[in-house]
Image (tube, rainbow, N blue to C red):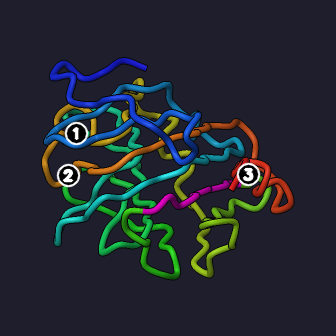
Amino acid sequence: MIFSSNNASEISIGRCPESKSLTFNTSTSYVKTPCLDVTGGSFTVSLWLYLQFPCKGQSPTIYAEMRQTEGESKGFFLSVKDRHFHLTVIHGGDVFVELLKSNHEIKLNTWTHFVVTFRDEKSELTLYVDGKKQDHASIWQGINFFSNLGVPNCTIGNMPDVRLSNKYQLFGSVMDFYLLHSAVSYEYIDSLRGKF
């Protein structure tokens, strides 16, 4: 990972005394990260999140993948909005399409486990919060949408590049962040959670 130029992200204690997390507690703090291949194959995103506080009207961003094409940034991001997890696709400009949303509000100041899987054979996205499958699943019709765009730029803690903004700033911590190029089964979700 590469820390942002303002170095506002820091390593802190994780959910267990012997573990570490990446904490974001300053405006426009983020880290660059390897990207997930969302050009059609199955994938899993898994992480633990400690949300300190959300601000009304903001979308603290956990993970974002943006690609520049013809002067527009397109991509998707995992965020917290109105204390719910969301997965949103940006088709350019101000065209935002929400694909997933968690059933219940996220508890503040506690660790919450979050998993998104995409199964290419069904074109199905599924969201799990603390090991529980959420009701709101989606067919990702535009999965090949990303394959025709430029090289991705991926971040944790805020949006990359031109969309970097206080509106998307995460105030909290992330740990055990995994990007897998396969969709894990429901039975394997608890293994991703580790000691809980």
Taken as a whole, is the magenta stretch helix, strand or loop? strand
Q: Position of residue 106 (x, y in %)?
A: 43, 72
The answer to the question of whether label 2 and label 3 lie on touching residues, with beta carbons closer than 8 A, is: no
Asked whether residue 111 is drawn in magenta, I would say yes
Amino acid carrying mark 2 in the image: Gly
Q: Residues within 10 Å of mark 2 (few under 14, many from 20)?
A: few
Answer whether labels 1 and 2 touch (C-beta < 8 Å). Answer: yes
Q: Decide: few, some or many residues near mark 3? Use Cα within 10 Å; few <14, some 14-19, many ≥20.
A: some
Q: Which image quadrant: the C terminus? A: bottom right
Is 85 part of what is drawn in magenta? Answer: no
Whole-angstrom CA distance, mark 1 to mark 3, is: 27 Å
State the residue at coordinates (41%, 23%): 151
Residues drawn in magenta? 110-118
Indicate the secondary structure of the residue bearing disc 1: strand
Q: Secondary structure at mark 2?
A: loop
What's under tag 1, amino acid-wise?
A: Glu
In primary-sequence order, the first of circles 1 and 3 is: 1
Q: Which sits earlier in the primary sequence, circle 1 or circle 2?
A: 1
Residue of label 3: 120
Q: Return the residue found at the far front.
A: 17
116 sits to left or right of 145: right
With 101 as the anchor, is 183 left or right in this view? right
Q: Which mark is residue 93?
A: 2
Name the disc covering residue 72, or none.
1
* 34 over 37 or under it: above or below: above
Q: CA distance from mark 2 to mark 3?
A: 27 Å
Say whether disc 2 or disc 3 marks the residue closer to the N-terminus.
Answer: 2
Q: Please identify the residue farthest to the right as the structure is shown.
A: 187
Image coords of residue 77 (percent x, y): 39, 50
- Mark 1–mark 2 Cα distance, whole angstroms, equals 7 Å
How far across and how far down the image is residue 13, in percent?
A: 45, 37
Residue situated in front as seen by the camera: 107 or 116: 107
